[in-house]
Image (spheres, helix red, strand yellow):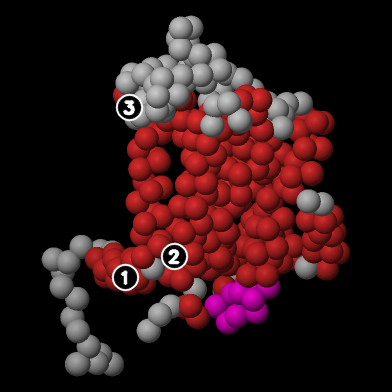
């Protein structure tokens, strides 16, 4: 029997319009909550500037990051006595423009963050899904391995892994991804255990959904919120740890303009040429600060318990 009061769908309305409207509403609510956090908006603007700087580095940078000016070793910034207008932030010990190297360094630091988070997210989520869904001995084995990894200080474990794999940017990114993986595994496992007990998962199982469909189609989409926040915070951790490995000369190798490597190259000039250590350090600080601010905003927007009234 047809309900006479039920709305009749408009045949001219394209399919999926209602779902698109629902998505727009969700996105609108998310942005409204996110922008209430002024710090998060500032962090997002700074991060967007860094991304644009990295993308358009060849157009923005005055010189190549490898170009040397042999008559301008350790030239101070343009506003200091002895500075040269063509080198706004001065030059390093071999006459390379600091501003150009900092701009190109954004490419490497952001690439490190993206690659490390992608690898650790993929591995950690997969392990967490398996542990949380199947439980039992599988869960115990996977989580004990994750606990062993977490029991070591992250930078020490990353150093050990790089020593095994060999120094270099690629190996440093792999080592950092392995170190960060347990955080995603534990988060995913906890979320899967909560979602697995809910009625919609039971309904899918009764309807005949196989294990893979239940894991990747039914459960996984409902675990995204904490993973997004963790991925944002892990991005800043990856940038910091890559800079630390570069400073210890086992990460990116010269002449790569990675900010940690720039700091390592400038260690012996800390007292005589302050700019060669200050500007790379500030670049790392600003990037990590901006990403952490964005992470705080995402946490507020994605966690209903933290949404402001």
For this view, does 39 lie left or right of residue 197?
left
Give the mark toward the camera: 2 or 3.
3
Q: Is residue 243 above or below residue 302?
A: above
Nearer the observer, 241 or 161: 241
User: What kind of element bears circle 2?
Assistant: helix
Numbered mark located on residue 32 in the image: 1
Counting residues from the N terminus, which is met first, the one under dot 1 or under dot 2? 1
User: What kind of element bears circle 1?
Assistant: helix
Q: Where is residue 224 shown, x and y percent of the image?
A: 53, 63
Residue occupied by mark 2: 297
Q: Residues within 10 Å of mark 1 (few under 14, many from 20)?
A: few
Q: Residue at x 37, y 84 (%)?
A: 309
Q: CA distance from mark 2 to mark 3?
A: 30 Å
Q: CA distance from mark 1 to mark 3?
A: 33 Å
Residue occupied by mark 3: 60
Q: Where is residue 260 shown, x and y percent of the image?
A: 60, 34
Determine if residue 145 is in view.
no
Q: Which residues are magenta?
A: 193-203
Counting residues from the N terminus, which is met first, the one under dot 1 or under dot 3? 1
From the image, give the main secondary structure of the stretch colored magenta. Answer: helix
């Amino acid at each position: 029997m047809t309900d006479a009061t039920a709305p009749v769908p408009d045949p001219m309305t394209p399919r999926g319009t209602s779902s698109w409207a629902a998505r727009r509403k969700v996105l609108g609510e998310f942005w409204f909550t996110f922008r209430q956090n002024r710090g998060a908006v500032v962090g997002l603007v700074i991060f967007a500037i860094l991304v644009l700087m990295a993308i358009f580095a060849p157009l923005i940078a005055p010189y190549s990051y490898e170009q040397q000016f042999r008559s301008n070793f350790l030239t101070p910034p343009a506003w200091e006595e002895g500075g040269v207008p063509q080198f706004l932030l001065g030059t390093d010990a071999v006459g390379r423009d600091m501003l150009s190297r900092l701009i190109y360094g954004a490419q490497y630091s952001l690439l490190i963050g993206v690659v490390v988070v992608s690898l650790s997210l993929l591995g950690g989520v997969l392990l967490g899904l398996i542990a949380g869904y199947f439980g039992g001995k599988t869960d115990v084995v996977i989580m004990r391995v994750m606990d062993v990894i977490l029991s070591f200080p992250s930078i020490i474990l990353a150093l050990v892994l790089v020593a095994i794999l060999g120094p270099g940017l690629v190996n440093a990114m792999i080592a950092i991804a392995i170190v960060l993986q347990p955080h995603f595994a534990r988060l995913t496992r906890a979320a899967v255990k909560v979602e697995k007990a809910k009625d919609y998962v039971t309904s899918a199982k009764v309807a005949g959904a196989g294990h893979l469909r239940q894991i990747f189609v039914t459960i996984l989409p409902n675990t995204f919120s904490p993973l997004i926040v963790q991925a944002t915070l892990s991005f800043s951790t990856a940038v910091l740890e890559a800079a630390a490995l570069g400073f210890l000369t086992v990460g990116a190798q010269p002449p790569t303009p990675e900010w940690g490597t720039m700091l390592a190259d400038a260690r012996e000039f800390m007292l005589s040429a302050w700019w060669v250590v200050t500007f790379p350090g500030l670049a790392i600080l600003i990037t990590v600060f901006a990403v952490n601010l964005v992470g705080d905003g995402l946490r507020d927007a994605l966690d209903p318990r933290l949404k402001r009234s």
